[in-house]
Image (tube, grey):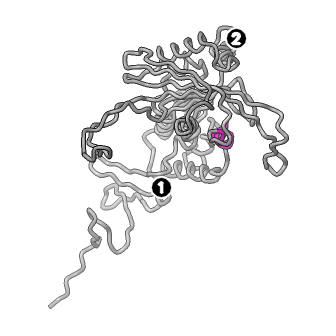
Amino acid sequence: MNKKEVLEIRKQFTPANCAITRICGCYVDHEKTKRLESKEAFLSLPEEEAFKYFDIFKKTLSGSLGKNLLNMEFPLEQEMPGGTQEFLLKLKNSKLEDDMLLEEFYDKIIENYEYEENYYIILIHAMYDIPGKGTDELEMYDASDEVFEYLICSICPVSLSKAGLCYNAEDNRIEDRIRDWIVDKPDKGFLFPAFTDRSTDIHGVLYYTKKSQDLQPELINQVLGAKMPMSADSQKETFQMIIEDTLGEDGDYETVRNIHETLNEIIEEHKDEPEPVSLDKTDVKKIFENSGVSAEQMEVFEQTFEAAAGEKSILIAENIAETRKFNIETPDVVIKVNPDRADLIETRIIDGRQCIVIPVDDHIELNGINVRTIKRPQADN
């Protein structure tokens, strides 16, 4: 799924567009005990309650593709009888009216979701009458030829509100506030089937994680059974390893800076495209070559890439680039530079020592105080 397709499904979570047929929930305590189970028609919910659920479902389809939202495919064995994909299809086709399937689904999550406090599993069934699109990309609501039937699962932590004082308007007094258990925004979730090329894709699932470094492999493997991609944080660490191992001991500041600048240029060129920029081994090789990595260093590139990432691994450009910061660190000094102005930093040999040179204007700021870089010469009396 790309950004446009995710946004198209997100737009369904409004009173005007809502086509949620059924909502089910299971409240689990810190001992993994089911404390509450519910199932009802979504349209029977009070309006204010429905709006709160809309926010949760929108959040489950939010964040950066390749970082918080991960497209995953089912391996063939999971599409066979007894596989996870077949189970999810049964759950969808039941329209969440089969209690045994629901119990099995809840049990799978409870067994494999790593969370030490209380949480609330929300599962909805919905149907989206996909409008056709003309050559001008405008939607034609009278030209629909497919209904997208799907499930969304949101796993939300439940935490106790903070202690404090509050105003009691009825008694006109300040008193101790009653602490409530609050359902927070989702930590994990998924959309099944995927909505690929604006159509039902039973071979894929869109997975949501609030924290990119916390994918929870067991939850993915046991509940979804889909092929898990490398996390955003792992991609960055892998890319850094590829740079270091390719450049070796001769890695210099200018070359590494050029690699990051080239990456940022690629991201900027494709920023309006719905798909994130994906880089395979050949793409990364071109980036290195265009950034000044020597032919001698490139001789070990392919071996280095395959050892660090795997021959057919895909890296997302935004996951491996530093678009918001550019840090230069020594044991005692950290220099933070706007990534767009990394060219301001130079390396020179001065008096036989390796130096980092930063050109500045007439003054700099020291702990919030404007100061001159060089003291004015004293006038002779």
Residue 229 coordinates in the image, percent (x, y): 57, 28
Is 272 situated above or below 145? below
Label 2: which residue?
Answer: 80
Q: In the rendered image, which quarter is residue 93 located in? A: top right
Residue nearer the viewer, 184 or 77:
184
Q: Residue furthest left?
A: 381
Q: Name the residue at 39% across, 20% down.
A: 29
Give, as a three-letter code, the residue at label 2: Met
The reply to whether callout 1 and callout 2 are in contact (CB within 8 Å) is no
* Residue 339 circle label: 1
List x then y, in percent, for residue 84: 62, 15
Residue 132 as seen in the image, left or right of residue 27: right
Residue 72 in sight here: no
Image-quadrant location for residue 146: top right
Please tell me whether mark 1 or mark 2 is closer to you in this view: 2
The prevailing secondary structure element of the residues shown in magenta is helix
**In-front residue for pair 322/343:** 322
Q: Is residue 11 magenta?
A: yes
Residue range in magenta is 1-12
* Residue 183 picture quarter: top left
Inspect this view and state whether residue 291 appears.
yes
The residue sitting at the front extreme is 171
- For this orientation, the residue located farthest to the bottom is 381
The residue shown at (68%, 17%) is 94
Specify the amino acid type for callout 1: Pro
Residue 76: x and y, percent? 69, 16
Q: Residue at x 42, y 40 (%)?
A: 249
Give the number of callouts.
Answer: 2
Relative to the observer, which residue lies in front, 17 or 227? 17
